Image (tube, coloured by chain):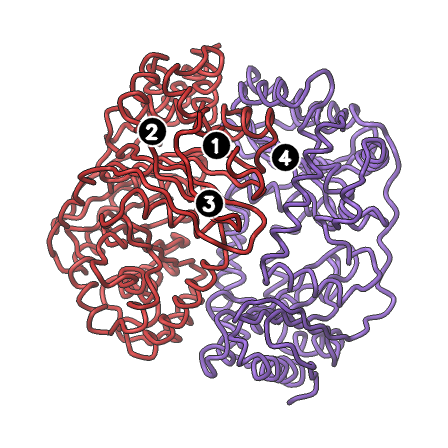
Chain colours: A red, B purple
Amino acid sequence: MRIAPLILFMLYACTVSSLEVKSWKTSQGSIVMYYNTPEIPMADIRLVFSAGSARDGKRHGLSRMANKLLMEGSGDLNSQQFKNKLSETGAQLYAGSLREMAFINLRTLTDPKYFEPAIGLLISAVSSPHYSRPEVEKAIGDMLIDISLKNESPSQIAQEAIWNQIFKDHPYSNYPGGRESTIANITSSELSKFHASHYVAKNATIAIVGDLTEVRAKILAETISSSLPAGQSPLKIPELTEFIPSNVYIETNSDQTHLRIGSIGISRTDEDYFPMIVGNHILGGGSLVSLLFEEIRNKRGLSYSVYSYFIPTEIKGPFVIGLQTNGEKQNVALAESLKVLRDFIEKGPSVESFNLAKENLISGFINQIDSNQKLIGYISMMGFYQLPLNYLDTFSKKVEEVSIADVRNSFQRRITKDFAIVMVGSKQQELNQNER
Amino acid sequence: MRIAPLILFMLYACTVSSLEVKSWKTSQGSIVMYYNTPEIPMADIRLVFSAGSARDGKRHGLSRMANKLLMEGSGDLNSQQFKNKLSETGAQLYAGSLREMAFINLRTLTDPKYFEPAIGLLISAVSSPHYSRPEVEKAIGDMLIDISLKNESPSQIAQEAIWNQIFKDHPYSNYPGGRESTIANITSSELSKFHASHYVAKNATIAIVGDLTEVRAKILAETISSSLPAGQSPLKIPELTEFIPSNVYIETNSDQTHLRIGSIGISRTDEDYFPMIVGNHILGGGSLVSLLFEEIRNKRGLSYSVYSYFIPTEIKGPFVIGLQTNGEKQNVALAESLKVLRDFIEKGPSVESFNLAKENLISGFINQIDSNQKLIGYISMMGFYQLPLNYLDTFSKKVEEVSIADVRNSFQRRITKDFAIVMVGSKQQELNQNER
């Protein structure tokens, strides 16, 4: 029973030859990730840059605005002309930026009649955005509204606060949506400067999934890459020098309290990556079965939802437990969650939960790569973090190889004894890490 | 240029033979919709019942709770045992219910080793849920929290309010999440009774998409259908006897005002379906280019977002314009939106916007059916509303055949002169429909 999913997956991997991810560099130094799916005459092309809010410096919101405005006028087209032309192609073009990555994604038919103009628009957007003053003003207005909406959502407030508590002055503390004080005076020339230094070939991962031959993909990647200035590889993000546990209670008028418990987790290329994700699946990552769900919700009725996750990043990213509970129960929920976590770190998982988690991770993995949209996300991530090309093929094997001792040891070595704690609710109080 | 997307799509439809949707009835009278996609060894199986909140009667929330609890204990398994077994299969099982449809969806590998137990769990959930008292109590708690969260979200408040303003005492007014006053005392026996009369073979659409042969799909559908009592087809939902325009202002503490303008729209089998969706795409449905976006946001800077949509249902469903604006601008935003809408109804679309909308709808249609998840939604909808089997193949042709006069005529005949209007904000006032 424990081996079977692996065999099944490997069988699938062998018979479906197109599981092979290919990678090369363009002459300008962009990383290309390519995966052929010939079933539907469409393609996804995603360009990813290390140009998220970790690159904002003191100009919070600059990276997000630079990304948002790619599609609002570029080359010889203003915003409206650009959208009219895009509409004619039937393609979907969307952009996004978080802490590390900023991306733009084109989803288009591969028939040259649509493909060529759609690619032209992608290149125009990414290489020559105008950042015209009227569009910048609209973007400022939109981002200020985004912030006010975020501030109306207790769960989003808690989410941002846990990053701040963990990372403090480190660049990962920067909220991707920026701050009111800095957004309001971002200028066109700042945006152009940010764009010119970050949206460059040496900082680009070009991912291509779809009904394009390798030859066509090579020409395409070369065309895109050569439309960008060569530029420089970005500086590495510094590791967090020291994790300092701390607490914060943020007042809202909600009866529900949102709790986050945070620590330092793993990087994308972490040697403990697989033991940690198996362990987290047991602790609070599994959507059906988890220790936290069983103890906090099922047995004690303390919360509506409870979960845990790692966000693996270039450096070690956050480890977070999250839950939402009635304000009256916030203290008990915190104490019991800490107890479950500390017990898990001390004792490790049960054999039964360990086997169940591995089976579920392996047999469920195909769900993560079963459409072009999911694949483009996966392979662009692989390129961005320079994961091995056989990552998809070996995922199940790596999970299978994790032992119960690996999980316990890695959690004991890696997860801190004290935590960053955030509560957002209407029952302000001193937080206590030490109830057991 | 205008014909090409159609040709392309028809070419695609002809070469990819698997675009053919098949349908039959089981011996117990369930409708089966089947579509073979052999590329990946997975399948989606979705059972849809006419068992949404339109069937709640005065027991608001009953349909949602009956659906939510399908996976919380059934047959000889309690909730935890059920989830452990499901976890072993790697399958994803999820349920949902809105106003008309209630569904349960299984996404599983087709290897019999996983497929057979996963199907067993699907059948157990849909045919013999326990509705045990402890699980009912948890569901009551969850649904009360869902309502309190909804009441913290101005956009969700506006959303519900526009249904109420349009449908008043009609069953479509029933909020799928129920009401606090009724949820708190829903009983196990009520739930079992609702389940026994609605989750029956004659009320079931069984949709199957994936790597299953037609023979295997036939056996599967027969097995599922025969596990349910035959039961009765549900009564038709009555048409709304009369649409009565009305206004409401709902006070919140948000600086942003959420505006909805509503009227009566179209049914899924409406003879004006295609002219109306082409017209709506021009007016406010297009994500890139629309009249409302151009006039309200681009030219006048009145709103953050603005859009319009139809929700086609068994009877004529809602037509809604929505926007979010600064509270200070709410009056102007309302007046200008009404002006754009009334001008559009009076004059119809421009030739340029009309051609652009048709091209975009046709060349973008493939985006709606390019994964198993999207296909299962589409074909189960086709079965539920008894749309023609060639609906997917003829979509582009039907759009192409719409004339500019069809759009103007259908909007003039169908959209009312006065509207249901909802504002949610902090600047309470009398609403005026007649500013022009």
Tag in front: 4 or 1: 4
Disc 2 residue crowd, few under 14, some 14–19, many 20+, Cα 10 Å: many
Q: Are marks 3 and 2 on the same chain?
A: yes
**Mark 4 — residue?**
B105
Residue type pointed to by label 1: Glu
Q: Label 4 vs label 1: CA separation?
A: 20 Å
* Chain containing mark 4: B
* Disc on the earlier residue, 3 or 2: 2
Identity of the amino acid at label 3?
Answer: Gln
Above or below, comparing residue A29 to residue B188 in the picture: below
Identify residue for label 2: A392
Residue indicated by mark 3: A429
Q: Residue at x 72, y 23 (%)?
A: B74
Q: CA distance from mark 3 to mark 2?
A: 46 Å
Task: Report how far apart the C-alphas of labels 2 and 1 lie in the structure.
Answer: 18 Å
Dot 1 crowding, Cα within 10 Å, few <14, some 14–19, many 20+: few
User: Residue tagged by mark 1?
Assistant: B39
Q: Secondary structure at mark 2?
A: helix
Q: Can you tell which mark lies on residue B177?
A: none
